[in-house]
């Protein structure tokens, strides 16, 4: 399960999504996440899913790799679906279990919420898969540059956010190594009740914290040796420029938002 967490990973490529301006990519991803919460029926949600599938095909990222990001939170998705299945109010009763009733409205809501969460996770993962950590740092710094008026160190904030995102795969790999080492020593991490399994995590958390602090110290020392200060005068090897490709995706998002609004207006009776 630990190996299935793919947050923060980058998939090299030369697709249209890889060549997009990272600032535009971040903004469009936020708009996608914002709009998906306003989908009120399957027509609007299906339009979002079709747009996402198109983005996946353009990106060149293997679909199996994107499904990995869903596998890591499958428990949350299943629990959300079950809660909506049994506790959604209204609709015709399909199955009466005594303590709970399953209605057609509950089935509809459960499927709707499951698809919505899947689109959210895959859409967010697609951005990190097609954007290098360096470009992501520069884009966040540019987008947050208006905060400099309030004397906020935007460059430091952007670097912290990107480093946190970048080290997620590293920490996941470290957890996997520690778990294998503990299992080799006879530790039982999978059997027993909840309290026993929680106690079994202590031998994992302690070396993980030690390793995390050691990596943080080594990274800070390496940055100091390279005279990194994070000042506003720092130059960049790759300059970000808007192109016709970015304009094309902006138009596509505008059409997508318009379509969602129209579907929500004309098919409100389906929710």
Image (cartoon, helix red, strand yellow):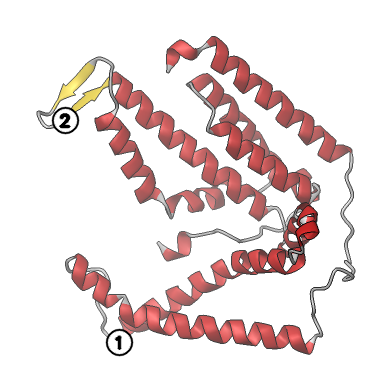
**Callout 1: 10 Å neighbours few (<14), some, many (20+)?**
few
* SS for dot 2: loop
x and y, in percent, of residue 127 in the image: 66, 49
**Frontmost residue, 107 versus 233:** 233
- Image quarter (top left, top right, bottom left or bottom right) of the C terminus: top left
**Which residue is located at x 53 percent, y 84 percent?**
213
Q: Are the residues flagged by discs 1 and 2 in contact, CB closer than 8 Å?
A: no
Q: Which residue is mark 1?
A: 185
Residue 62 shows in the view: no
Q: Which residue is mark 2?
A: 100
Residue beneath the point at 35% across and 31% down: 110
Using the image, determine if residue 193 lies above or below residue 40: below
Q: Residue at x 53, y 33 (%)?
A: 37
- Compared to 204, does 121 lie above or below? above
Judging depth in this view, the residue of 138 and 231 nearest the camera is 231
Residue 236, quarter of the rendered image: bottom right
Ranked by sequence position, the earlier of labels 1 and 2 is 2
- Asked if residue 165 lies left or right of residue 206, the reply is right
- How many numbered marks have been drawn onto this rendered protein structure? 2
**Above or below 251: residue 238:** below
| Mark 1 and mark 2: Cα distance apart in space | 46 Å
Q: Quadrant of residue 229?
A: bottom right
- Secondary structure category for the residue under label 1: loop
Where does the image place residue 241, in percent across and percent down from the top left? 89, 50
């Amino acid at each position: 399960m630990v190996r299935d967490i793919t947050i923060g990973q980058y998939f090299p490529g030369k697709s249209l999504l890889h060549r997009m301006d990272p600032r535009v990519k971040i903004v469009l991803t936020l708009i996608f996440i914002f709009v998906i919460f306003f989908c009120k029926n399957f027509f609007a949600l299906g339009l979002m899913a079709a747009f996402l599938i198109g983005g996946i095909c353009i990106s060149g990222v293997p679909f199996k790799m994107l499904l990995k990001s869903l596998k890591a939170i499958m428990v949350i998705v299943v629990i959300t679906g079950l809660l909506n299945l049994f506790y959604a109010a209204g609709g015709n009763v399909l199955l009466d279990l005594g303590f709970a009733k399953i209605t057609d409205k509950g089935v509809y809501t459960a499927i709707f919420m499951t698809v919505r969460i899947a689109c959210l996770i895959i859409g967010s993962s697609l951005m990190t898969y097609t954007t290098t950590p360096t470009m992501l740092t520069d884009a966040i710094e540019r987008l947050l540059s208006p905060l400099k008026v309030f004397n906020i160190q935007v460059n430091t904030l952007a670097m912290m956010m990107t480093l946190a995102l970048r080290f997620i795969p590293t920490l996941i790999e470290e957890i996997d190594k520690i778990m294998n080492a503990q299992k080799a020593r006879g530790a039982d991490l999978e059997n027993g009740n909840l309290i026993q399994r929680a106690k079994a995590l202590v031998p994992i958390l302690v070396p993980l914290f030690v390793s995390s602090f050691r990596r943080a110290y080594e990274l800070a020392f390496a940055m100091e040796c390279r005279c990194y200060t994070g000042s506003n005068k720092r130059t960049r090897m790759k300059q970000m420029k808007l192109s016709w490709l970015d304009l094309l995706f902006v138009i596509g998002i505008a059409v997508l938002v318009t379509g969602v609004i129209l579907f929500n207006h004309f098919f409100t009776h389906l929710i």
